[in-house]
Amino acid sequence: MSIKKYIGDRRFYRSVTALVIPIIVQNGITTFVNLLDNIMVGRLGAEQLSGVGIANQLIFVYTLALFGGLSGPGIFTAQFYGKSDREGMMYTFRYKLYVAFLITAVGYTVLSLWGEPLMLRFMTTDNTADGSAVDAALTLECGLSYLKWALVACIPMALTNVYASTLRETGHTTPPMAASAVAVATNALCNYIFIFGKLGLPAMGVVGAAIGTIIARVVELAIVMLWTHTHPVKAPYIIGAYKSPYMPGKLTRSVTVRGLPLMMNELLWSSGITILQQCYSTRGLDAVASVNISTTIANLFNIVYMAMGTAVAIMVGNQLGAGEIEEAKDTDRKIIAFSLVLSLGIGGLMALLAPAFTLAYNVSDAIKSCAADLIIVCACLMPINSFIHNCYFTLRSGGQTFITFLFDSAYVWAIDVPGALLLSRLTTLPILPLYILVVSLDLPKCLIGLLMLKSGKWAKKLV
């Protein structure tokens, strides 16, 4: 097979980079703020770092459920945009508002009522007798204090995702990027002031980190809403979006049928990942802190292949909506190849810098050493994760949501979760070999994804 099939021309790479650079910048800014939050909280101590990490793992389930809930109508938005259907885009935007409200209400209620017992699942009795220097009681107290306030930030975050995702799906990636940039600066400043007690304010610790996030989320929402409502020509779907609650029955059924598997997929996938984190926590709260650090660093480097997945969703989705099936397959193949090459280089850089990243944390040398090793593991797996991630968005772009469900969350629950539970409960493996074995369970997923891509059955026009 000729390698030329995987290489685009200059025009292709200009189109891809023009699309993904704002997304990379936006996600990079957001992730960098998360890193700053992580480092600032880490300066307070390992208990605060572990507590906030566990609380964020619970919020992560809500975040992914929201992402999945908006992904279904997002498929239709991209294809409606490809065929210049303003009314269709307006209805999918309205549908997103309903979904965001429902998921946020459920998530807020569940985490408010059952946050403590859920966090206690990460605080196994082994944590107090495994030699960890981390205080379990203080960790729980810090986590609950942070969670109570952080839940408030979910409300503006939900609305921001409705607006920002629609802007991206209709080709306007710069406004969400600019909003994130301002939000990041706001978050960093507020965190510094509230966490450490500057400008005459008392030091609030982990609560200060949550309050800083709330303020930043409100600022971000204000910016994307203002841009959308003041640019009706570029965002025509906003005209009349709030005038009526009406949704066409046929479109509602189509979006729900396609979208429900995606929402359930993200909910089950994120729940599965949370169980994996709980399995790692059986090796002690030192392990929780190490995994928290490594995950935060990895997320900063993963933004490139994550953005390439978004490029697949937008570019391939637009071409499918326009009926350009073969062009969509060609675009998809070249974006995935580009993403793999980038991931190899970025993963190498991440592995080289691994020990340096841990120096900013006020934790023990044992935690720093373990975190550095875990970062290297994440770096080695980056090309694999890149391919799997882009396979997911490829299947999703053609509306193959049930297949996406099987490929993503069903695999996690059928393979990853049972494997992690058996390894964590039936062996005494330290955290590093345990982590390596668990993440290696995704290797067969690459072959499954490759076979699905080669079949070409995913490439369908929906609108």
Image (cartoon, grey):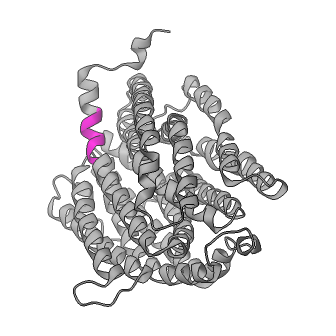
Quarter-wise, where is residue 446 in the image?
top right
Q: Is residue 258 above or below residue 55?
A: above
Q: Is residue 172 visible?
A: yes
**Residue 454 on the magenta span:** no
Indicate the position of residue 426 as horizontal and vertical percent values: 84, 55
The tally of labels here is 0
Q: Is 233 or 11 nearer to us in this picture?
A: 11
Quarter-wise, where is residue 241 in the image?
bottom left
* Magenta stretch prevailing secondary structure: helix
Q: Is residue 73 visible?
A: no
Q: Is 125 or 275 nearer to us in this picture?
A: 125
Q: Is 113 or 292 nearer to us in this picture?
A: 292
- Image check: 405 left or right of 426? left
Indicate the position of residue 374 as horizontal and vertical percent values: 56, 49
Indicate the position of residue 244 as horizontal and vertical percent values: 33, 71
Q: Residue at x 70, y 72 (%)?
A: 121
- Image check: 366 left or right of 25? right
Q: Is 14 or 197 nearer to us in this picture?
A: 197
Q: Residue at x 52, y 50 (%)?
A: 372
Q: Residue at x 39, y 57 (%)?
A: 92
Q: Is residue 234 above or below residue 217?
A: above
Indicate the position of residue 167 as horizontal and vertical percent values: 29, 53
Query: Which segment is the magenta one?
Result: 16-22
